[in-house]
Image (spheres, helix red, strand yellow):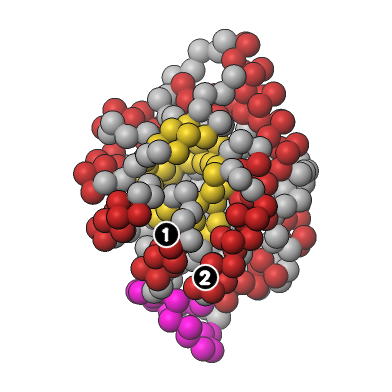
Amino acid sequence: MLPQLNFGHIQSRLPIIQGGMAVRVATAKLAAAVANEGGIGIIAGTGLSIQALKEEIRKAREMTAGIFGVNVLFAATQFAQLVKVSLQEKVDFIVSGAGFSRDVFAWGKECNIPILSIVSSARLAKLAEKLGAAAVVVEGKEAGGHLGTDKPIFEILPEVVSAVSIPVIAAGGIMDGYDIAKALALGAQGVQMATRFVASDECEASDNFKKMYLESKPEDSVIIDSPVGLPGRAIRNSLTERLAARQLPAVSKCKGCLKVCSRSFCILDALEKAVDGDVENGLVFSGEFFHRIRNILPVKKIFGQLLREYENYQSSKPQFSGY
């Protein structure tokens, strides 16, 4: 049996967190479906208005009595406002990456709501613990979206586990029950899975977006330079080819969504186009191992698969010491 995942006052029946994928990929419908299966759901707040996020949180509350939180990118201009409305709506936890806000830990403490930090090294994990993080999500190079490292998760994970005393959650390239077993064997208390849950019935991204995961080839996982100032992992399409050739799409109107932006192209516009179905001119963020997904399933069936794979791994008693 999979162990529970505990952090702060949270006790989850299963140690599986669904990643917070912006923009409008990780919504209330997906978060609630994951929570209903005993995992932990996440609504991506980045790119939403304050009112839209409030509505998503309330919708999730109507759909589940399970555990769910909100992910907000620290680089977002409305970071503080999005976090504060999430706290006011009494979500179970907040998770944030791409930088540190000392204030967010104080806000969480005032509301008795755990704050989780996404990190990519033992040094950053120790800093997060010192600032007051209830747990850290350590993300390897295999993750989709913005990246903080070029090292694989199973190389970083043992270093982080030995560096901190708070729970460590492994992320990046976790695709099945076998990966979950490996992560737990290396000392993680849980895993975060994003890419696998995109290919679910409950994910509200367009069908075209999901089909990219099923129809693209392994070599189509590419790294782009994001206006955020970090590399990002996406699936190759017309937009990524133009970005690689420095044929950057013009920014017609800046919405000021980021605190610091190179304005090389509008990432918000690119993410919105993709989730709405324009997967050639939009940006389809995805983890490196998307090609291991064979079909789009209901979240319930995905959990069934993960649990069977984990049990099969455990019963075979393999020896594992990392990749």
Q: How far across and down, in percent of the image, does residue 136 sit? A: 37, 42
Asked whether residue 265 is drawn in magenta, I would say yes
Q: Position of residue 196 (x, y in %)?
A: 64, 44
Label whose residue precedes the other's in the sequence (1 or 2): 2
**Is residue 202 rendered to the left or right of residue 34?**
right
Q: Position of residue 68 (x, y in %)?
A: 54, 48
Q: Count residues near mark 1 (Cα–Cα under 10 Å), then give few for <14, some for 14-19, many for 20+.
A: many
Kindly indicate whether the residue at mark 2 contacts the one at mark 1 (C-beta within 8 angstroms). no
> Of the numbered discs in the image, which one, if any, rests on residue 47?
2
- Image quadrant for the N terminus? top right
Residue 190's place in the image compared with 268, above or below, is: above
For label 1, the residue is 87
The answer to whether residue 235 is left or right of residue 278 is: left
> Of 73 and 281, which appears nearest the observer?
73
Q: Residues within 10 Å of mark 2 (few under 14, many from 20)?
A: many
Q: Nearer the viewer, mark 1 or mark 2?
A: 1
Question: Which segment did they paint magenta?
Answer: 250-266
Which residue is found at the position 46% from the left and 56% from the top?
90
User: Between 172 and 164, which is closer to the camera in this rendering?
Assistant: 164
Q: Is residue 9 visible to us here?
A: yes
> What's the amino acid at mark 2?
Gly
